[in-house]
Image (cartoon, rainbow, N blue to C red):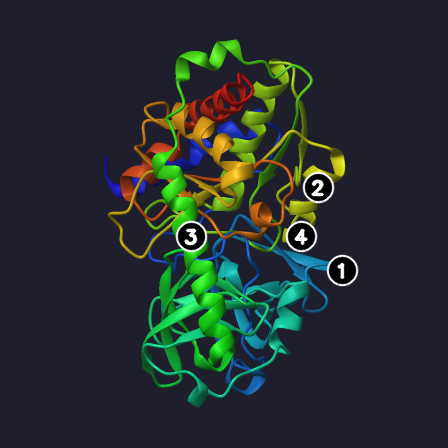
Amino acid sequence: MNSIKRSVSVRRDIQANARKVGEPIPAFRHKGLASLTLAAGIGAAVLAVAPGEAHAGNGYTAKVYTDSLNVRSTAGPDTPVVGSLRSGDVVTVTDENLGWLKVENASTSGWVAGYYLKRENGSSASATVNTASSTSAATGSIAASSSVSTGSKALVTANSVIIRSGPGKSHDLLGSANRNDAVTVLDQQSGWSRIQTSYGAYGWISTKYLQGGSSATVKAAVQTQKAVNVSTAAAQAPKADTSSIQSGSLQGKLIVLDPGHGGNDPGTIGTTYGLVEQELNLQTAMYVRDYLVSRGARVEMTRTESGQRPSLASRAQLAPSLGADAFVSIHYNSALSASSNGTLVCFYSESKDLELARAMEAPLKGGTGIRSNGLAFGNFKVIRENSVPAVLLEMGFLSNASDEATISSAEYQKNAAKAIADGLQLYFSN
């Protein structure tokens, strides 16, 4: 089957499945677009570049790469909708403001989220999205590049900073780092620093959002030791026995499901078939909800629609505010290397989360058709600042052609959802 036919088949499969669970039909991008990954900060808002990269005097043409794109009166996710664009529509971009692009064609004019456009010359039209926190991030404390040197430790000074695959805005997004994240500076080029986070993510960020000094060294040591301690505990913990699943009961248990991303934040984009993560997250969560409810559980979700994008803080606060028994955040992964594949269970606290993580991992092994990468320390806000047992699941790599093809099927979605429900039931068997 050639790539064009395969893409159409995949698209129909996902659309049919979406209609079954009452979701909007997913948006799709085409092969070759920059992949927006989660490797360095799941669900975090990205720091927008300064406005004014495109102006009326030097506008450019771009094409829409999503089924339906709202055109708004001004830049921002909550402003009035004045029109819409469809996949393939060509527009002229005349201005940019914090990741929102001002566009016009014969039928409409206004502002759209830049993620969903691509320049006709093949490059990304915009690589940033405006969120409530990105504006404050832009005004965060900024360190002089001279305070950071290769081989030193540094702290991120803005609320959220883009991590890229290379030293410059033209490189693909790999994720983001958050304020006070401690990093090791591995290299520097032209105002950019190649960094490694305490939880193992690599990439390049603008050096002006890094601050060196003794406090960075101390915090880096603390965060690194935390990651080592938790990873060691995970490696030494006994494996969960899937034969105990049926002895568990979900009757009356309150589970909060968190489909990652949403709204104007699509998450990662598949590099082979263009699957959009935020839609997959929601679709998987809907299936999980159905399995849990059928087993007697009560379920709350942080979002139930594609257009919703709750803040990271509100996601983390929902489960404890409801007195929930567990919190599960659902994502799909991506990496710079196309060979990276498999599922991953991320947890933060050894005392609070490890038992749940172990239980979630067991049914994922062999239960989805994608290999399991086991457990990993995850320094992510939605589980770090969550007072109930919490995990963040990576259900496969959209940057891997084989994983993405498997993920695209309705069968995978159902198998993955059942494995998640089984994991929760296993957790409550103790």
Q: Which residue is mark 4?
A: 313
Residue 227 is tagged as 3
**Left or right: where does residue 396 sit relative to residue 307?**
left
Dot 3 surroundings within 10 Å: few (below 14), some, or many (20 or more)? many
Residue type highlighted by circle 4: Ala
Single out the residue that lies furthest toward the top.
247
Q: Which sits earlier in the primary sequence, circle 2 or circle 4?
A: 4
Instruction: Residue 86: tell me if it is visible.
Output: yes
Q: Which residue is mark 1?
A: 80
Q: Which sits earlier in the primary sequence, circle 3 or circle 4?
A: 3
Query: CB of mark 3 within 8 Å of CB of mark 2?
Result: no
Q: Which sits earlier in the primary sequence, circle 4 or circle 1?
A: 1
Whole-angstrom CA distance, mark 3 to mark 2, is 25 Å
- Residue at image location 24% in from the left, 47% down from the top: 339
Q: For the residue labelled by badge 1, is the local secondary structure a helix, a strand or a loop?
A: loop
Of marks 3 and 1, the one in the foreground: 3
Residue type highlighted by circle 1: Pro
Whole-angstrom CA distance, mark 1 to mark 2, is 28 Å
Whole-angstrom CA distance, mark 4 to mark 1, is 25 Å
**Left or right: where does residue 379 sit relative to residue 170?**
right
x and y, in percent, of residue 312 in the image: 63, 52
Q: Relative to residue 287, is residue 263 depicted above or below?
A: below
Q: For the residue labelled by badge 3, is the local secondary structure a helix, a strand or a loop?
A: helix
